[in-house]
Image (tube, rainbow, N blue to C red):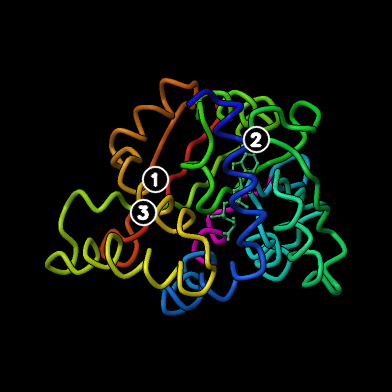
């Protein structure tokens, strides 16, 4: 599938499940997603701009966690799904430094060097080609800034004696379709998790894209990983 057709498919998919997204996230991860996002936010560093980009911001859970845990000047919350952002906007309340922006991670509607950290939670595996997003992220990051990625582990190594893999391929698509009534969406989730590179391969991919240093850390026995990629100062 070409990148444009893929983008259209993904944004339509998230538009369709936006109403169920938060509930299913918490339910299917048994509340772990809140802890994972909190750990992601703890990796944020500030520099000269005071601004953060939360890319693939969805219903703004990471942006809100940043607003609560950190004192950012502006949090640009970029996502191409209008319905996901709309759902998130209803939760902003007093977090006035969050600025939702409808846009594509491959063509960021932001000026050069305007943020100190880019966060992306459960988003990078949806973007094709990822190299286009890396290029844009490097452009908007200030020198010395960092990209902090939260993403599922691929399940290529057995976690909890294969329980995670069973959950991923059998339980998750069935529960997802039961609530969201979208047979494609949660199968897509399982497929993209499996197809995503292992942590070490992703680290090399980020170095090849131009980041100067990359670290990664498994959480919950490798169900998810945090990757931190530094732009040269
Ligand atoms: C699984 S959700 C994650 C949302 C949020 N970060 C979270 O932690 O819940 C993935 C999001 O990525 C967005 N997305 C996928 N590809 C994108 C792209 N090329 N540009 C902008 N947003 C994208 C989708 O619209 C969706 O809201």
Residue behind label 2 places its C-beta within 8 angstroms of ligand 1: yes
Q: Residues within 10 Å of mark 2 (few under 14, many from 20)?
A: many
> Against 49, is 63 above or below?
below
Q: Position of residue 60 (x, y in %)?
A: 69, 61
**Residue 89, image quadrant:** bottom right
Q: Nearer the viewer, mark 2 or mark 1?
A: 1
Residue behind label 1 places its C-beta within 8 angstroms of ligand 1: no
Determine contact: label 1, label 3, CB under 8 Å.
yes
Tell me the number on the disc at residue 192.
Answer: 1
Q: Position of residue 141 (x, y in %)?
A: 67, 33
Quadrant of the frame with the C terminus: top right
Q: Residues within 10 Å of mark 1 (few under 14, many from 20)?
A: some
Toward the viewer: 99 or 218? 99
> Against 21, is 191 above or below?
above
Q: Which residue is mark 3?
A: 190
The boundaries of the magenta stretch are: 38-46
Q: Residue at x 43, y 29 (%)?
A: 206
User: What element does badge 2 sit on?
Assistant: loop
Tell me the number on the disc at residue 165.
Answer: none
Q: Which residue is mark 2?
A: 105
């Amino acid at each position: 599938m070409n990148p444009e057709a893929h983008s259209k498919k993904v944004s339509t998919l998230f538009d369709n499940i936006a109403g169920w997204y938060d509930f299913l996230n918490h339910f299917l991860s048994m509340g772990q997603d809140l802890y994972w996002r909190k750990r992601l936010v703890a990796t944020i560093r500030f520099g000269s701009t005071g601004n953060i980009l939360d890319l693939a911001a969805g219903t703004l859970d990471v942006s809100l966690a940043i607003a609560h845990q950190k004192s950012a000047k502006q949090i640009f919350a970029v996502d191409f799904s209008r319905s996901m952002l709309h759902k998130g906007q209803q939760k902003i309340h007093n977090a006035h430094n969050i600025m939702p922006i409808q846009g594509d991670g491959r063509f960021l509607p932001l000026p050069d060097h305007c943020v100190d950290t880019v966060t992306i939670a459960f988003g990078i595996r949806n973007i094709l080609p990822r190299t286009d997003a890396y290029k844009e992220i490097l452009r908007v990051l200030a020198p010395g800034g960092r990209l902090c990625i939260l993403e599922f582990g691929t399940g290529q190594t057995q976690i909890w004696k294969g329980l995670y893999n069973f959950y991923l391929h059998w339980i998750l698509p069935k529960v997802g379709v039961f609530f969201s009534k979208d047979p494609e969406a949660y199968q897509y989730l399982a497929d993209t998790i499996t197809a995503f590179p292992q942590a070490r391969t992703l680290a090399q991919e980020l170095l090849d894209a131009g980041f100067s240093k990359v670290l990664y850390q498994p959480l919950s026995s490798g169900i998810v990983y945090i990757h931190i990629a530094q732009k040269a100062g």
